[in-house]
Amino acid sequence: MALFVFDLDGTLIDSRRDLADAANALLEERGGSPLPVDTIARMVGEGATLLVRRALTAAGLDPESPGALSRFLALYDDRLLAHTRLYDGTREAIETLAADAPLAVLTNKPTRATTTILEALGVANLFKWVLGGDGPLPRKPDPASLHELMKRARTAPQQTVMIGDSPIDLATARAARTRLCLVRYGFGFASSEQDLRPDDMLVDRPSDLVPLLRSISV
């Protein structure tokens, strides 16, 4: 294959606790009650704006509360790496795959937070390109950013694999006509069997990525 593109939250890193803690801090500041971690985790994947709106709505607060987004981002910046870790086996998997093809990160998380996390976890150097959700291109599931990565890698959709954990990643791959690998261990995994195609790939742990992705034929 010519390009492996990874989602971040729920695919490379388990960031549920830090995202939930930041969201709950915002809710409590605005007079609401905290939500369960798993409830907030299910709101992740389409960018901070939607996460904040969903959390405020679930807590019975005004989803358009002035300044809520900027305050959430500040609260999250203070917690980026309090509990966030690579999933077990991820480092070894991407180190191996980086020898086979260029790797990229495509996420709806802001770019600065993304690069800060990747650098702190010691894997930033393994990714040739990192595209966040606050750049000039539209966020996933719009395929524009994935098309841009394929252009940079000079590769075709059938030589590209989108690796993610959520319906957003599935929709992005479909829109860009790339191959798809979904990770069942991610907190965004909610795709039912009818959403999948025979050539879609599924893994239960990061260590499964290497043999599966190496088995693909173009």
Image (spheres, rainbow, N blue to C red):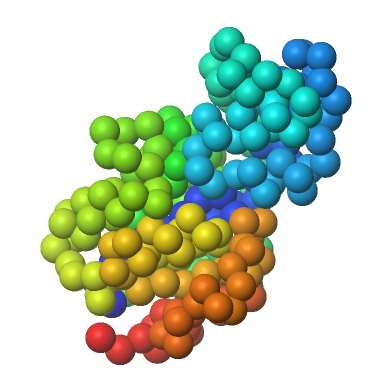
Question: Is residue 109 placed above or below 146 in the rendered structure?
Answer: above
- Compare residues 96 and 113 and report the one nearer the observer: 113
Residue at the outermost top position? 66
Q: Position of residue 97 (x, y in %)?
A: 40, 71
Q: Is residue 74 visible?
A: no
- Compare residues 21 and 65 and report the one nearer the observer: 65
- At x 32% / y 40%, what residue is drawn? 138
Q: Position of residue 11 (x, y in %)?
A: 55, 58
Q: Is residue 18 left or right of residue 129?
A: right
Question: Is residue 32 placed above or below 7 in the rendered structure?
Answer: above
Q: Quadrant of residue 59?
A: top right
- At x 19% / y 70%, what residue is drawn? 156
- Compare residues 155 and 80 and report the one nearer the observer: 155
Q: Quadrant of residue 218?
A: bottom left
- At x 59% / y 68%, what residue is drawn? 191
Q: Is residue 56 left or right of residue 145?
A: right
- Count of marks overlaid on the render: 0
The quarter in which the N terminus is drawn is bottom left
Q: Position of residue 119 (x, y in %)?
A: 47, 41
- At x 40% / y 52%, what residue is drawn? 141
Q: Quadrant of residue 187?
A: bottom right
Residue at the outermost right position? 33
Q: Is residue 158 visible?
A: yes
Question: Is residue 32 placed above or below 42 in the rendered structure?
Answer: above
